[in-house]
Image: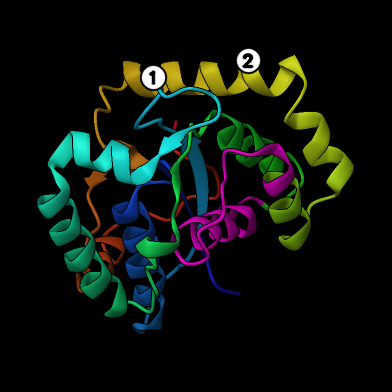
Amino acid sequence: MSQMLSMIVYSDVVCPWCYVGKRRLEAARAFAGMPDVRLLWRPFELNPELPAGGVDRKVYRAAKFGPAQSALRDARMTEIGRACNIAFAFERVLRTPNTRLAHRLIWEADRQSCQDEVVERLFRGYFEEGRDIGARHVLEDIAAEAGMERAAAHRALGDDVSLAAVVALEHEGLQRGISGVPFFLLPGATVVTGAQSPEFWHARLGRTQIAGSAPA
């Protein structure tokens, strides 16, 4: 039986580097001697100030980077994604969403034992399919596609329990000094930041003590 390593990942589902980081870590599993890795996804909001309905992406990006620089950044990220089998389709992404609801769904997905599947579908839905992952009905559809009970998704997107849990987890991340994502916390309080290469993960995880439980 293969050993299991649990790793906490602070991430936002509108962060392209978080998607790339996930893919690169997954690619490392092809190396011999790699442990099975269980990812425990934690919330980090890149744009917590956005309105609940999100904003027009072109307008938002133009204001933040300028139109030309925004286009260059998207082109570069598309090329990076292609190398790890991500088909970034930024031309399909019409809105930059507020991701608080998405993180509440991810929290509930952990309770339903399908967290990684939901995170995967959120990344793919937003970056490759251009879906508005700030909209409740879209999130409920994505949850169902990932194997979550739609009723559980509906409840999590509307009750105070998931909201309080996400706020508490975000506060925990801030207390850890997290200011950017992806941020990986391994057993033994080992920290890795950024979308590291598969080769990096092969070397690092080969030196990491296997633990059945998540790092504290």
Q: Nearer the viewer, mark 1 or mark 2?
A: 1
Label 2: element kind: helix
Q: Say which amino acid is labelled 2.
A: Ala
Q: Residue at x 27, y 80 (%)?
A: 83
Across and down, in percent, residue 11 comes to 40, 42
Task: Check the picture and name the quadrant holding the N terminus.
Answer: bottom right
Range of residues picked out in magenta: 115-138
Q: Which mark is residue 58?
A: none
- In the rendered image, which quarter is residue 104 located in? top right
Q: Does 151 sit left or right of 2 as displayed? A: right
Across and down, in percent, residue 126 comes to 50, 55
Is 121 covered by the magenta stretch?
A: yes
The majority secondary structure of the magenta stretch comes to: helix
- In the rendered image, which quarter is residue 188 located in? top left
- In the rendered image, which quarter is residue 62 located in? top left
Q: Are marks 1 and 2 in contact (CB under 8 Å)?
A: no
* First reached walking from the N terminus: tag 1 or tag 2: 1
- On the image, numbered disc 2 is attached to which residue? 164
Q: Residue at x 73, y 15 (%)?
A: 160
Q: Does 169 sit left or right of 204 as displayed? A: right
Mark 1–mark 2 distance (CA, rounded to whole Å): 18 Å
Label 1: element kind: loop
Q: Say which amino acid is labelled 1.
A: Glu
Q: Which mark is residue 49?
A: 1
